[in-house]
Amino acid sequence: MEICGQFLFRQLEAIRPKAICVLGATAIKALLNTKEGVTRLRGNWLKWRDVPVMPTYHPSYLLRAYNQAAKREAWEDLKKVLHYVYD
């Protein structure tokens, strides 16, 4: 992450996205430099260099049969991102 993160950060600086949706703990930790977990951060807008960031669950977590509630939460998170970007 330390080496590849440099490429990611340069790409994000060049692209300057309107918003970023990070999927899973590894992406959240890499982008936001935090030790907070996905469950605590998901659903709340955060910032990365003045770009709004929406953390949510990783898709592999959502594929597990016992995570029906998490699927609904992730869908709500994605709708927040879509509304932000397109409204």
Image (cartoon, helix red, strand yellow):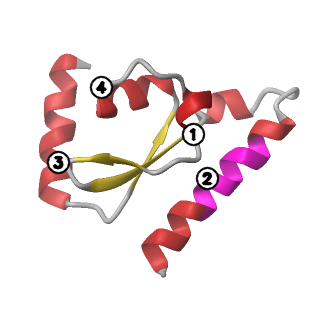
- For image coordinates 53% across by 35% down, the residue present is 41
Q: Position of residue 58 (x, y in %)?
A: 58, 33
Q: Secondary structure at mark 3?
A: helix
Q: Secondary structure at mark 2?
A: helix
> From the image, which quarter does the N terminus lie in?
top left
Q: Which residue has dot 2 on it?
A: 77
Verify CB contact (< 8 Å) between mark 3 and mark 4.
Answer: no
Q: Amino acid at mark 4?
A: Asn
Give the distance between the C-alpha atoms of the residues marked 3 and 4, in whole angstroms: 17 Å
Horizontally, residue 41 falls left or right of residue 35, namely right
Q: Amino acid at mark 1?
A: Arg
Residue 42: mark:
1
Q: Position of residue 56 (x, y in %)?
A: 56, 40
Q: How busy is the neighbourhood of tag 1: few (under 14 within 10 Å), some, or many (20 plus)? A: many
Q: How busy is the neighbourhood of tag 3: few (under 14 within 10 Å), some, or many (20 plus)? A: few
Q: Which residue has dot 3 on it?
A: 11
Give the distance between the C-alpha atoms of the residues marked 1 and 3, in whole angstroms: 24 Å
79 in relation to 53, above or below? below
Disc 1 versus disc 3: nearer the observer? 1
The tag earlier along the polypeptide, 4 or 2, is: 4
Find residue 69 and report its image quarter: top right
Q: Nearer the viewer, residue 21 or 52?
A: 52
Q: Nearer the viewer, residue 84 or 46?
A: 46
Which portion, as a residue range, is magenta?
Answer: 71-79
Verify CB contact (< 8 Å) between mark 2 and mark 1.
Answer: yes
Q: Which residue has dot 4 on it?
A: 33
Is 73 within the magenta? yes
The tag earlier along the polypeptide, 4 or 1, is: 4
Q: Secondary structure at mark 1?
A: loop
